[in-house]
Image (cartoon, helix red, strand yellow):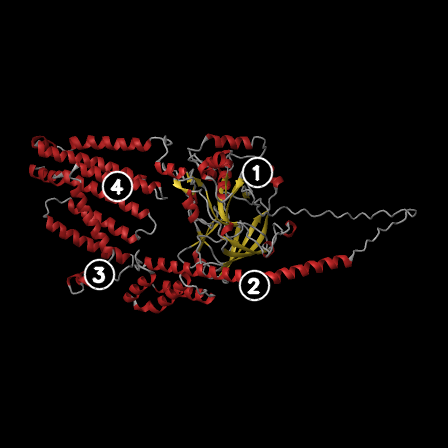
Amino acid sequence: MSGATMNWRKRLLFDQWPHRLTVLLCGLYLLQLVFWFQKEDYWWLPETVVVVQLTLLTVAILEHIPWLHWMLRGILQLMGIVFIQVTVLQSYKVIEPMTLGSFFSSKLFLNLYELTPYLWFGLGAWVAYLTLIWWVESKWRIYFLLVGSVLTLCIRDSFSSVYLWPQVAVMVGCGLFLVILAHFRRLRQKDPAAWRHLADYPVSIVAPVAVLIILTLLVGIAMPEVRPAFMDPYTAWRAYRGEPMNFSTGKGVQVSAALDALDASSGYSRNDRFLGSGFQFDYTPVMTVNTTHRGYWRGESLALYTGRGWQQSEQERGTWTQVRADSPLATDLKLPGDQMKTLEVTQTVTLLTDEKYPVLFGAYAAQRVLELNGGRLGFDALQWSPSQGELRYSERVPYPKTYTIVSQLPIIDEAALRSLTRETPRQELAPYLQLPDQLPERVRTLAQEITKNATNDYDRAKMIEQYLNLNYSYTNKPDLTKGRSRDFVDRFLFEIKQGYCDYFSTSMAVLSRSVGLPTRWVKGYSSGTTAIEQPSFGFVPEEAIDPNAAGLYTVRNSDAHSWVEVYFSGYGWVPFEPTAGFTMPRALPVNEPVVDTTPAPPLPEDVPVVSEPVVKPHYYTIGGAVLAVLALMAFVVRRWQLVDLLREKVRRRRASLLKQKLIVECERLLRIFRRHGYIREEHETLREAVRRWTTKSRWMKGELDIVLNHFEKAKYGKEEITEEDWRQTAQIVEKLRSQM
C-alpha cells in the first residue's frame, strides 16, 4: 500500500478529529432533548420527532466533511432539511405528493408554506445544532449548559410520570467528553508542539480517556439503589403544608399525590406499569350487560410484576388467532382445564359511551362470540388468545356498540380442588411464578406465615384471600405519606395498609407466587347493579339481592375492578376476590335435594288433633295507621314541593351530563384535527382556531360552525343542552373524522 493512500485514509478518518467528536457529542446531546419531548404527551407529533431526528443526522454527516466550504455545506444541509420534510410528511400523509421540479418554479413558496409548521422545527434543530457546536468551545459555557439542562430534566423527571434518568446519564457523559475536548483546544493554543503529537496519534490519548469515562458511567449505573439520606426541599415543603406525597413512582424525589388524585378518576385503566395513588369515583354508565348469570366482566390479564406495577410478559406477546363468526374459541392446550365443570352463561353487552377498548368484556371463560352489532359481520377486527383468555379488538376500527358472548363459568368444586396434589411446575407456568429480585424478604415470610397450616394449594389461596379481606381496609384515597418501601406490595402490606382493588389483587398475586401458586393479575369490571339494587330511596334489604341472579346490569366507571386467577392442574384458572367489601359471583355445585318418599306414620286414634288458634289481625287499627302515615307524607310533599324539587334536580343533572358529553365530543374533534395538522395554538380560542381552519379548508365550514355554536352554548351559555344538540355534534365529529 502506497504512502499516499495511507495519508489519504488517515486524513479521511482523523483529520480535525476534535471537531468531529464535538459534532458527534453535540448531536447526541440534542438527541436526548428530542427523546424527552417524545415522551411527553401532546408535545410533539410523531412526524415532528422523525423530522427533527433526521435533520440532526443530516447535519452531523455533513459536518463530518471538514474540507467542504462552509457556504456549500450550509446549502447542502438546507436542501437536505427540505428533502426530509417532504419525504416524512408524505409518508405520514400530512401533505400531498410534491415533485422535485416544483421547487424550481413559481410553486416554491407555496410548497414551503405547505411544509409549515414542521419546516420551522427542522430549521430550528439545524440552528440549535450549529449554535451548540459553537457554544461548547469554552469550558465555562459547557458547565453552564450541562448544569442548566441536567437540572431541568431532573426537575421534570421528579415531578412528573416521565422517566428521564437515561437521558440525564447520556448528557452527563457527553458533557465530560466535551470538557476534555475543550481542554485539548486550549492545549493546541498554548503548546502547538504537544498538540501536533496528539493530532498525529489521537488514539493514544482518546482511547484511555474514553474507556475511563465509560467505566465510570457503567459503575454508577450498576451501583445498588440507596434511599436518600435527606429529604429533598420539595418534599419538605409539601410535608410542612400537610399535603400528602406519593412514593409509588420509584424516583428519588417524590411526586405529589394530591394533584394525581384530583386528576384521576375511576375507569378501565390502559396503563398498569405504575400502580398506586388515589382516584375520584366516576359514576358515568359505561355499558349494560343482559346476562343469564351474574359475573365479573373480564378484560385483560397480565403476568409480569415489576415491583411498581404490571406489564405483559414475553409469553403473553405470543400468537393470536382470528375469531370466526359463531365458531368455538380454541382452548389452551399447554395449560388445560378440562376437568373443571362449567355453567353456560350468555351475555349481551351494550356500550353506552363512545369509548374504545382493546378487548371485549365478558364472563370468564369466553367460549364463542355470537354477534357483533346485531350481526355476524366485522369479526375481522377480533382476535383470541387461548393462553390469556382475552378477546382482543382492533382499536383501528369502530368499537362495536353491542355484542353477545357465550361463556363457560367455572363451577367451583372445592372438595375436588382440595384433593389435588402439587406437581412439579412446568415451563409454561414460569411467567406466573415470576417475582422481582428486589422483592423484600418480609413479603415472602408473611406468605409462609399465612399459609403455614394449609395442607393443599386451594386452601393456601383461600387463606391469602381471607387474610387480605379481613386485615386491610378499602379506600379510594389511601394515605400515601405512610409509604417508604420502593415495592408496591411491600408498601401496602406493611406501611399503608389501606387501598383499593389494585392494592389487594396485586398483593394476593405476589403472596400466592411466594408460596408456589401460579397466579395472574386480571382487570375488567365488577358486576354492576340491576334496577332493584339502585332504588330511588334508601336501603335495599339484603334478601332482595340475589348474588348470582340473571338480569340486566348497568356497569359504570366506578365498577372498574381488578382481581386474580390461580392455576390448578387439570382444572384451569380459578378466580379469587381478595378486595375487602367485594364478593365475586360464582357458579357452585348444585346438590339435588333428597326427597323422602317414606309415608308418614298415622296418628294414634286416641290422640286428639289440636288445631292452632287463629289470631285475627286488627285490620281497623293497621288501616288507620297506614292512612295517617300516607296523609302525613302527602302534607310534607305538598308543603315543601318535594316533587317539583326532585324534578328540577333530575333535569339539572341531565342537562349537566349532556353538557359534559358535548364538551368531550369537541375535545375528541380537537384530537382528530391535531393528527391531521389542524393544530389549535395555546393563545387561540376555539372560535379563532375554527376561523383559521375554515379559511384553509372551506369545505368543512358549515359543520364546524354548528359544533362551535354548540360548544360555546355548553361551555359558556346558560341555556340547556338538548339531546338533539349532543347527537348532532357527535354525528358531525364522526363525519369529519371519516372525511379527513
Q: Residues within 10 Å of mark 3 (few under 14, many from 20)?
A: few
* Res 312 seen here: no
Picture quadrant of residue 337: top right
Sequence-first disc among 2 and 1: 1
- Residue closer to the observer: 289 or 621: 621
Q: Give the numbered dot on residue 149.
A: 4
- Residue closer to the observer: 207 or 107: 107
The residues tagged by marks 3 and 4 sit, at their Cα atoms, a distance apart of 33 Å
Q: Which residue is mark 2?
A: 644
| Place of residue 84 in the rendered image (x, y in percent of width and height, measured from the top left) | 22, 54
Three-letter amino acid code of the residue under disc 3: Tyr
The residues tagged by marks 3 and 1 sit, at their Cα atoms, a distance apart of 66 Å
Q: Residues within 10 Å of mark 4 (few under 14, many from 20)?
A: some
- Residue closer to the observer: 387 or 263: 263
Q: Which residue is mark 3?
A: 113
Three-letter amino acid code of the residue under disc 4: Ser
Q: Residues within 10 Å of mark 2 (few under 14, many from 20)?
A: few
Nearer the camera: disc 2 or disc 1? 2
Q: Which residue is mark 1?
A: 470
The residues tagged by marks 2 and 3 sit, at their Cα atoms, a distance apart of 60 Å
| Place of residue 211 in the rendered image (x, y in percent of width and height, measured from the top left) | 23, 31
Nearer the camera: disc 2 or disc 4? 2
